[in-house]
Image (cartoon, rainbow, N blue to C red):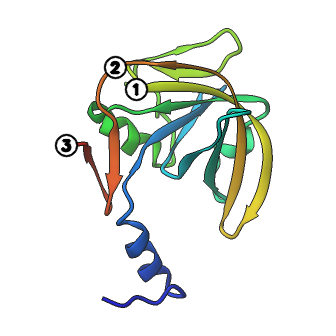
Amino acid sequence: MRLDPARAEDFRLALGHFASGLVVLTVPGPAGMTVQSMMSLSLVPPLVALGIDRRSRVWPRVTNEFCLNVLTADQYELAHRFGRSGPDKFRTAQWVIADDGVPELLDAHAWMRCAVHAQHDGGDHLLVVADVRSLRVGVGEPLLYHRGRAGRFSS
């Protein structure tokens, strides 16, 4: 099927064919949001890149460090809740506050503590490059997002 990249619906449909992981970005407050567009950018130095919607109410709260919580296959409900605007995102989540006030979600697949390295114009999004300051890994399977649905990886 031929699609027109100038049509937002067609572009979204085509991009939906690319599976990605889901992460919840958390900041002091506590506040957080689901991010689907994250990628590794550099090993030396350790950098990741994120696509952040310009309409985000959470991103303006980033002042220094933030945490990227890589979700497990069992954490779809968290991805869904943090993907919406509104209060009480942390109400039923299991989380702790680190020494610097940044919340971390428990039972995540991995955690990356980051600081903003650079921000660039990306149309209706910001392209954020972040320094990875520390990281930990957990257990479990990753939560994947593909064609508008979240699920498990199967081989």
C-alpha span from label 1 to label 3: 16 Å
Q: Nearer the viewer, mark 1 or mark 3?
A: 3
Circle 1 residues within 10 Å: few <14, some 14–19, many ≥20:
many
- Mark 2 lies on a secondary structure that is loop
**Residue located at (30% from left, 24% from top):** 140
- Mark 3 lies on a secondary structure that is loop
- In the foreground, 78 or 119: 119
Identity of the amino acid at label 2? Val
C-alpha span from label 2 to label 1: 6 Å
Q: Percent position (x, y) of residue 147? A: 31, 63
Note whether 139 is above or below 49 in the view shown: above
Q: Which residue is mark 3?
A: 154
| Of pointers 2 and 3, the one earlier in the residue sequence | 2
Q: Single out the residue that lies furthest toward the left.
A: 155
Identity of the amino acid at label 1? His
Kindly identify which numbered label has been placed on residue 109: 1
Image quarter in which the N terminus is found? bottom left
**Residue located at (50% from left, 37% from top):** 24
Residue 30 picture quarter? top right
